[in-house]
Amino acid sequence: MHRLQNKTCVITGAARGIGRAIAARFHDEGAIVIATDIDETLGPATAIAIGCRFERLDVREEADWDRLARLVPRADVVVNNAGVTGFEDGPVPHDPEHASLADWRAVHRVNLDGTFLGCRYAIRAMKGAGTGSIINISSRSGLVGIPGAAAYASSKAAIRNHSKTVALYCAQQGWKIRCNSIHPAAILTPIWDPMLGTGPDREARMQALVADTPLKRFGMPDEVAAVAVTLASDEATYVTGTEINIDGGLLAGSAASPG
């Protein structure tokens, strides 16, 4: 079954990781996929490999969203996935005491401003038909405090809240435009490579990082994509303003038996 047959789906940050997995899964489900990314090398290569269309998009820039609106004026599904941790260029302080205002703003500009602009684009691209699905990729870090990544946690928490605001606003207008957030925890994407390395101790590092996760493993990008497919499909037309955790049971509590 093609659950997204002929739906026009825009995905940000689609060149790699979770975004790429969602783009590939949507394409397999029959969607017309527009994969967007700031990376003009990997982005087109990913689109060719999947068999979809690529458009360059810097989610921070309003002008880029305006350009996309001209190129793709109507959309059925928008996935706001593009995001940064703040550690892309190496270790810098991101705790509440030592983080610089510039670094704080840089993370929020991509994660939060990018999601705000993506939701605004989505509403305008969907309201003509009066229906659609907006999926915002938040994080487990948006539900708990992260002392060493304050900006990332704050931005992801704001995405969670804004998703609910968008859901309520669209319902208030009488549109069947739904908005939900997905909250992945440790998903094995290239973002982890600097921490895991490529040496013989990689597996041990992986196990240490997921030691507190009840399922004792990393999640895979396609496991996030599977949830995104459901939220994008017509099977979830009564699901809006909600959040779905993909965390191996991490937020459920302790898997230990009482002593």
Image (tube, rainbow, N blue to C red):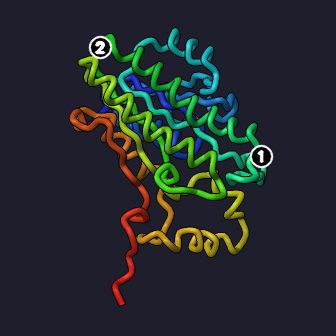
Q: Residues within 10 Å of mark 2 (few under 14, many from 20)?
A: few
Residue 178 lies in quadrant: top left
- Give the vertical position of 74 relative to 151 (above or below): above
Please give the name of the residue rendered at 56% of the width and 12% of the height, measured from the top-left corner.
66
**Residue 14 picture location, percent across and down:** 55, 35
Camera-nearest residue between 174 and 97 = 97
- Whether residue 254 appears in this view of the structure is yes
Badge 2 marks a residue whose secondary structure is: loop
Which disc number belongs to residue 18? Answer: none
Please give the name of the residue rendered at 69% of the width and 61% of the height, measured from the top-left corner.
195
**Residue 10 picture location, percent across and down:** 46, 26
Say whether disc 2 or disc 1 marks the residue closer to the N-terminus. 1
Please give the name of the residue rendered at 30% of the width and 41% of the height, measured from the top-left corner.
230
Name the amino acid, label 2.
Ala
- Quadrant position of the N terminus in the picture: top left
Indicate left or right for 150 with 34 as reference: right
**Residue 97 picture location, percent across and down:** 72, 53
Name the amino acid, label 1.
Asp
**Residue 23 picture location, percent across and down:** 47, 36
- What residue is disc 1 on? 89
Indicate left or right for 97 with 183 as reference: right
Camera-nearest residue between 158 and 233 = 158
- Give the vertical position of 38 relative to 142 (above or below): above
- Give the vertical position of 257 relative to 72 (above or below): below
- Whether residue 6 appears in this view of the structure is no
Please give the name of the residue rendered at 36% of the width and 90% of the height, measured from the top-left corner.
259
Camera-nearest residue between 49 and 85 = 85
- What residue is disc 2 on? 129
